[in-house]
């Protein structure tokens, strides 16, 4: 397992945006999926839930991400693929019919990143252009209209987009190479960060700062990391002191730079995980199915460390499920397991981390009812 260069967080939706330049050509990645599969979101040609990882496809992949009942993948040659629930045409194949195996996203060009969720999808191509498709009721396609699109449409003419995040498909937050942050779409909880609750159908800049270096999202909450080490949040966020939902329409600083947070993930509105720069893992919020990983089902109103390990590399969580990958390449899961989403071959909840299989080559993991894991094959050289 290679030792990746740490670059302001390792969220699944941007790990290959951060690392593409560091990974040598010839690297080969394989997708494994498990959990709920009602809409074919696992991509194995069935709609049957799986409680252990199953291999998807035979080709090499360089990127994977999940949304609500949909999965996105980018092949090694840059071809964009999607599968699962196809409401509003969010798969981007000129159809609204769901598919249970990977299909090509329409259009030419090579993809660098794909994301999306409940109603729409978006992606950045290798030339830095931004594209969207699917539902558009809140202007989330960013093309100045509220008309649905079943194939990708370009957003503006800029060629400086670096990464984009979303899980709901109703609003997007994106980072440009100049360190500016932009958002558009639904703004009911102030999640666009512009001081209003008015929807926007074209990208607007979040404040005037030019030192944003990373962004994370869960539900209606956005977390932005700046190069000075500070973390900011806006939208419908979780207050650690009460585990209640609080809405902010402009960025509010989360703790201090001395807290050394590297990334956050939020499941729904009640449970959060945080990874610090020293490799320690922390959790807080509601805990009815053991998703905090502390061996209890008791709510915690401030961050608690999960175990004593300081070798966590990347994390993800969703719907009462938590995942973490350690620096040795092992994958761990805990929390809700009703559909086998923990990947341990059972449907029993777990309140402390358990290892998923015996592999030590996991690169990253993401969850949204179903779970996707990325494993490394072949030679990989990192700078």
Image: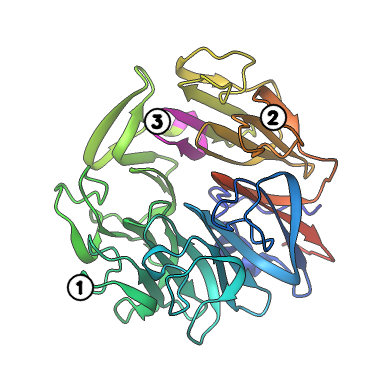
Which type of secondary structure does the marked residue at label 3 adopt?
A: loop
User: Bounds of the magenta span?
Assistant: 258-273
Q: Is residue 302 left or right of residue 325?
A: left
Camera-side mark, 2 or 1: 1
Q: Return the mark for residue 145.
A: 1
Q: Position of residue 283 (x, y in %)?
A: 53, 25
Q: Earlier in the sequence, mark 2 or mark 1?
A: 1
Q: Secondary structure at mark 2?
A: loop
> Residue at left 65%, top 29%?
334
Q: How is the image coloured?
A: rainbow
Q: Assign the magenta stretch its main secondary structure.
A: strand
Q: Which residue is mark 3?
A: 256
| Callout in the foreground (1, 3) | 1
62 and 298: which one is in front?
A: 298
> Is residue 298 rendered magenta in the image?
no
Helix, strand or loop under label 1: loop
Compared with 3, 156 (above or below) is below
Specify which label sits upstream in the sequence, 1 or 3.
Answer: 1
Q: Position of residue 196 (x, y in %)?
A: 14, 48
Q: Please identify the quadrant where the C terminus is shown.
A: bottom right
Query: Label 2 vs label 1: CA separation?
Result: 47 Å
- Earlier in the chain: of badge 2 and badge 3, it is 3
Per the model, the C-alpha gap separating discs 2 and 3 is: 21 Å
Question: Residue 84: image x %, image y %?
Answer: 54, 61
Q: Is residue 274 left or right of residue 228?
A: right
Residue at image coords 43%, 80%: 94
User: Which residue is pictured at 41% across the width and 27% down the height?
Assistant: 270
- To which residue does mark 2 refer? 310
């Amino acid at each position: 397992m290679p030792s990746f260069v740490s670059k302001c967080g390792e969220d699944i939706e941007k790990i290959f945006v951060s690392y593409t330049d560091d990974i040598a050509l010839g690297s080969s990645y394989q997708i494994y999926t498990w959990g709920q599969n009602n809409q074919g979101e696992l991509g194995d040609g069935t709609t049957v839930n799986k409680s252990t990882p199953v291999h998807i496809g035979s080709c090499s992949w360089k990127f994977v991400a999940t949304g609500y009942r949909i999965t996105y993948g980018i092949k090694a040659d840059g071809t964009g693929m999607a599968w699962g629930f196809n409401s509003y045409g969010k798969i981007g194949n000129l159809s609204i019919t769901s598919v249970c195996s990977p299909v090509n996203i329409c259009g030419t060009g090579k993809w660098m990143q794909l994301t999306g969720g409940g109603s729409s999808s978006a992606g950045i191509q290798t030339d830095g252009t931004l594209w969207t498709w699917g539902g558009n009721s809140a202007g989330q396609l960013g093309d100045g209209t509220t008309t649905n699109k079943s194939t990708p449409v370009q957003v503006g003419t800029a060629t400086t987009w670096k990464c984009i995040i979303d899980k709901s498909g109703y609003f997007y937050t994106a980072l440009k190479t100049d360190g500016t942050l932009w958002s558009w779409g639904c703004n009911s909880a102030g999640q666009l960060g512009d001081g209003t609750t008015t929807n926007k159908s074209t990208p607007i800049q979040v404040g005037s700062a030019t030192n944003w270096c990373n962004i994370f999202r869960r539900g209606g909450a956005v977390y932005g990391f700046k190069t000075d080490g500070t973390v900011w949040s806006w939208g419908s966020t979780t207050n650690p002191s009460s585990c209640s939902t609080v809405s902010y329409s402009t960025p509010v600083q989360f703790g201090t730079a001395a807290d050394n947070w590297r990334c956050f993930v939020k499941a729904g509105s009640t449970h959060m995980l945080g990874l610090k720069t020293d490799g320690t893992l922390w959790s807080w919020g509601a805990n009815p199915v053991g998703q905090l990983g502390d061996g209890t089902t008791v709510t915690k109103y401030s961050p608690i460390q999960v175990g004593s390990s300081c070798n966590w590399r990347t994390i993800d969580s969703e719907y009462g499920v938590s995942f973490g990958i350690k620096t040795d390449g092992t994958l761990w899961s805990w929390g809700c397991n009703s559909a086998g989403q923990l990947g341990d071959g059972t449907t029993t909840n777990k309140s402390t981390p358990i290892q998923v299989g015996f592999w030590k080559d996991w690169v990253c993991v993401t969850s949204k009812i179903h779970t996707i894991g990325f494993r490394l094959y072949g030679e990989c050289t990192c700078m």
